[in-house]
């Protein structure tokens, strides 16, 4: 029976070089490497199960001022005369920004102002005529030639009215003189008639006793009848004189009232005209002032749309925007239609400014403030929803110093909508392929 060789005997049968390798102990790295791989794999599995990744929705946006941005617009179509600001310039409230051509507006203003002073001058003349004063006060700004014309008209009208009044007073005086003469005649007749009657009665008695002739009596009788008739005529003349005097006095009052009525009507017309012209002048002044655009408050000029003197600005065309000094910047971003369902106000965001590499300078934190309810069409992205993002900081640290952010900077906004496990993210393609497998047509 042949003996089975032992291990030692088999080792002895190997060639010497191989015996040297088998007798030499293995390197320590060969013992550690399998265990290291096992540990890394186990740690990766634990991290995949326990670790989480943020789920973000990316959106492209721009920094814009919030709320109180002033849009500067012209009130009407105008030719630009001067451009007094440049893009990014700081201005104070009341500073001139842009001036339009004001040739026709100035002409309208000056014409209305002259018409207003003329109406005020006419009203002053009529007011003085109504009050019966010797002269009137010339309004400030009246042309000397026009004021002299109004003074001459005032004096001529006053002389005309005085002449008419004098003629009427003379007519009244004549009527009163005639009345006085008639009254004196009546008084004389009333005093003489009793004497004539007495003589007539005495003569009649003498005739009856035949101490006087009938002819003498008839002569005396005729004198009595004539005197009585004259008395009646004079009394009628007295009534006519009274009526003439009253009529003359009435014509004087009527002429005075008529002149006052005409002057009052002209005064109302002149004052109405002056009031209307004052309103037109205020509008013309406002229009003229509107042709010089001024800064409504302290701020910075952005989006200047005009750069050519002599160019035409259309009515209500946005010419520039004035960002207030204390304006807070926020992000206005566009979210794709497929992502908007996961975005809601209050979610945290990271804003990566294109002007500052986020890998070097970091991102600016913020939060979603509002999400639009309607989609808008974008030529490049299709239907998008706008979101507004409030920033936690208004500056970014660059090389150890804080640099203020400015409107117009573009940025990428990462909206954190949730989190998921690492293993879920890694296995998602597998799950997706499994669900969609064997369903193709």
Image (spheres, rainbow, N blue to C red):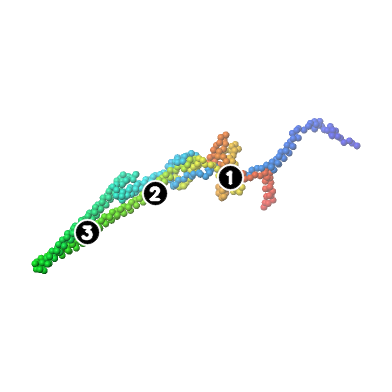
Position above or below: 260 against 45: below
- Give me the C-alpha separation between circle 1 and circle 2: 51 Å
x%, y% of residue 247?
A: 25, 58
Q: Residue at x 69, y 41 (%)?
A: 47
- Would residue 127 appear left or right of 287 to someone viewing this image? left
* Other-residue count near label 1 (Cα within 10 Å), few / some / many at <14 / 14–19 / ≥20: many
View extreme (right): residue: 1
Q: Quadrant of residue 257?
A: bottom left
| Mark before the other along the chain sequence, 3 or 1 | 3
- Give me the C-alpha separation between circle 3 and circle 1: 105 Å
Report the residue marked by disc 3. Answer: 241
Q: Nearer the viewer, residue 426 or 2?
A: 426
Kind of element beneath mark 2: helix
Q: Nearer the viewer, residue 156 or 251?
A: 251
- Label ID, residue 14: none
- Give me the C-alpha separation between circle 3 and circle 2: 57 Å
- Label ID, residue 279: 2
Q: Do we see residue 363 in this rendering?
A: yes
Residue depth check, mark 3 versus mark 1: number of the one nearer the observer: 3
- Would residue 287 appear left or right of 123 to someone viewing this image? right
Q: Quadrant of residue 398?
A: top right
For the residues bearing labels 1 and 2, Cβ distance under 8 angstroms: no
Q: Residue at x 45, y 40 (%)?
A: 95
Kind of element beneath mark 1: strand
Report the residue marked by disc 1. Answer: 368
For the residues bearing labels 3 and 2, Cβ distance under 8 angstroms: no
* Other-residue count near label 2 (Cα within 10 Å), few / some / many at <14 / 14–19 / ≥20: some
Q: Residue at x 80, y 31 (%)?
A: 23
x%, y% of residue 388?
A: 56, 45
x%, y% of residue 20?
A: 80, 31
Position above or below: 288 against 180: above
Q: Residue at x 36, y 48 (%)?
A: 116
């Amino acid at each position: 029976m042949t003996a089975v060789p032992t291990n030692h005997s088999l080792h002895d049968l190997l060639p010497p070089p191989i015996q040297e390798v088998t007798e030499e102990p293995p390197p320590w790295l060969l013992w550690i490497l399998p265990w290291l791989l096992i540990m890394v794999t186990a740690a990766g599995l634990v991290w995949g199960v326990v670790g989480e990744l943020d789920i973000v929705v990316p959106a492209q946006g721009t920094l814009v001022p919030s709320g109180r941005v002033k849009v500067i617009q012209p009130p009407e179509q105008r030719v630009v005369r001067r451009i007094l600001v440049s893009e990014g310039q700081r201005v104070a409230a009341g500073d001139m920004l842009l001036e339009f051509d004001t040739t026709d507006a100035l002409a309208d203003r000056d014409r209305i102002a002259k018409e207003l002073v003329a109406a005020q001058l006419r009203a002053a003349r009529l007011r003085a005529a109504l009050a019966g004063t010797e002269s009137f006060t010339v309004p400030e700004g009246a042309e000397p030639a026009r004021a002299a014309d109004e003074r001459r008209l005032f004096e001529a009208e006053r002389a005309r009215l005085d002449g008419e009044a004098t003629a009427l007073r003379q007519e009244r005086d004549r009527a009163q003189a005639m009345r006085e003469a008639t009254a004196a005649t009546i008084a004389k007749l009333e005093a003489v008639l009793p004497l004539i009657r007495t003589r007539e009665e005495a003569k009649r008695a003498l005739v009856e006793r035949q101490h006087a002739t009938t002819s003498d009596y008839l002569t005396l009788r005729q004198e009595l009848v004539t005197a009585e008739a004259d008395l009646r005529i004079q009394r009628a003349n007295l009534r006519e004189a009274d009526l003439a005097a009253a009529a003359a006095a009435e014509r004087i009052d009527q002429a005075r009232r008529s002149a006052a009525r005409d002057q009052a009507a002209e005064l109302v017309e002149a004052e109405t005209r002056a009031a209307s012209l004052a309103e037109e002048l205020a509008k013309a002044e406002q229009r003229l002032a509107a042709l010089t655009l001024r800064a409504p408050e302290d701020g910075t000029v952005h989006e200047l749309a005009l750069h050519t003197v002599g160019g035409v600005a259309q009515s209500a065309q946005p010419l520039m925007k004035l960002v207030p000094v204390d304006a807070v910047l926020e992000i206005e971003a566009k979210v794709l239609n497929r992502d908007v369902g996961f975005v809601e106000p209050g979610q945290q965001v990271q804003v990566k400014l294109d002007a500052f590499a986020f890998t070097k300078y970091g991102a600016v934190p913020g939060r979603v403030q509002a999400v639009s309810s309607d989609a808008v069409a974008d030529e490049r992205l299709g239907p998008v929803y706008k979101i507004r993002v409030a920033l936690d900081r208004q500056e970014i640290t660059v090389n150890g110093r804080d640099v203020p952010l400015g409107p117009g900077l573009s940025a990428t906004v990462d909206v954190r909508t949730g989190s998921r496990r690492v293993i879920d993210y890694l296995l998602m393609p597998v799950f997706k392929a499994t669900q969609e497998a064997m369903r193709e047509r």
